[in-house]
Structure formats: C-alpha cells, structure tokens
Amino acid sequence: MSLKKKVAIILSGALLFTGAAPVFAAPHPHAMNVEENQEFAANIDGWTTYLTEKYGVDASQVRAALTRGVHIRDIQIAAMLSKLSGKSFSDVLAMKMDWQQVAEKLGVTREKIDELYRQQMDEQLAHVSNVDVKTVQSLLKDGYNPRDIAIAGRIAKAAGKDIKSVLAKRKINNTWRDVAKSFGVDVHKLMPRPEELPQPQEPPTE
C-alpha cells in the first residue's frame, strides 16, 4: 500500500470534523490495530517526510516518536496541535491525556482546526488543478465546485490558457469533453481520479 493511500485511510477516520461533530472523537471501531500501526510506523522515512512537510514539525522528534511505536493517530494529532499552538511536537505529544483536553490547554480552538483543514483542502485542490491556492480560493468563493476547478485547471494548463477562460466555456448544454475539444485537448487524459480530489472528512460515529 502506498504512503498516499495510507494517509487517506488515517485522515478518513480520526482527525478533523464536519458539522457539529466533536473534534477528537473516540477511535473508530475499525481503527488500526497494533499490528497495522506497526506496519505504518515501519515506514519511518515516509511518515517523517509527510508530517514534517504538512505540519512543519521537527523531523527528528517525529522520527523518535515513530521509532518508539507511538500510535500514528496520536502522532498526527500532536503534529497538528503543534502547528496550531506554536509548541514543539515533543512537548505536545508528552501532554497527551485526552486530546480534547490538550487542545483546550493549548488554546487550539475548533475554528483554528477548521481553518487549517480548509487551507489543506485548498492546497490539495490547487495541486490537482495546476493553479495557485489564491485562485482556487477565489473560484470556490465564486461557487465553482472542486471537480470543475480541477478539470478546468488541467485543460487550461494543457492548452496554455487561463483557467477562468476555460470555466467560462462550460455551459449547461455542453460537457467538459466539449470544452476540452474546443481547446484541442483530450479530456480523458486529464480527468482527475476521484482519490485525487479533496474529500470531506467524516468523523468517527462511535
């Protein structure tokens, strides 16, 4: 299993929330068991790079936690709280009792976590769409959905056009295939895979 898929599995189960769900709910009944966690922790280089780049935490501290066998869910939550609170990763990880209590003690509010989540979603969509984050945020604010932004961005890059000019071509009576054809582009070679698009994270139900 690739690191990217492993990341998706973890993110789908534990960290962030939608609606009025709690931020740090109990582990999902299908969360990783000890053996699965060891498999994840075995990829120390991959996880160290991922968490360091995503949250700006100290690589040596993350590596040490992985080496000790700390559960990957706790490591990622600690990394997120470290980023949002300005405290070191190791200091945050050492505080672990109940992550909700730790977040409150660090002054990390639900609003801050929401903001970080939205930023990460925007960055992922920008990467998939081949445009900058500010453009993505502006288009989302204008009401465009992520899938259309991703497709239009890829067509724009392939055709050497501005993404807004591509989006303007998409009408109620045509398809993205028609739009791509008008720019001399094969849309089937550019269509983003579902797993590439940012997806809402559903919180655990148990």
Image (cartoon, helix red, strand yellow):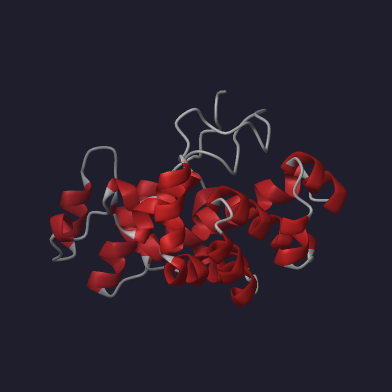
**Can you say whether 151 is above or below 154 in the image?**
above
Which is nearer the eye, 40 or 191? 40
Q: Residue at x 78, y 47 (%)?
A: 103
Q: Residue at x 60, y 37 (%)?
A: 17
Q: Position of residue 159 (x, y in %)?
A: 23, 71
Exactly how many numbered labels are in the figure? Answer: 0
**Can you say whether 26 is above or below 95 in the image?**
above
Q: Residue at x 17, y 57 (%)?
A: 187
**Can you say whether 97 is above or below 154 in the image?**
above
Q: Residue at x 63, y 71 (%)?
A: 56
Which is nearer the eye, 139 or 25? 25
**Can you say whether 201 is above or below 88 in the image?**
above
Residue sitting farthest toward the top: 206
Left or right: where does residue 91 sit relative to residue 35? right
Left or right: where does residue 124 sit relative to residue 56? left
Tell me if residue 69 can be seen: yes
- Using the rendered view, name the quadrant where residue 14 is placed: top right
Which is nearer the eye, 140 or 53? 53
Left or right: where does residue 54 sit relative to residue 58? left
Tell me if residue 145 can be seen: no
Q: Position of residue 60 (x, y in %)?
A: 61, 76
Q: Position of residue 136 (x, y in %)?
A: 49, 59
Q: Position of residue 57 (x, y in %)?
A: 65, 70
Left or right: where does residue 158 sit relative to residue 137? left
Which is nearer the eye, 172 or 6? 6
- Using the rendered view, name the quadrant where residue 166 is placed: bottom left
In the picture, which quadrant includes the N terminus? Answer: bottom left
In the picture, which quadrant includes the C terminus? Answer: top right
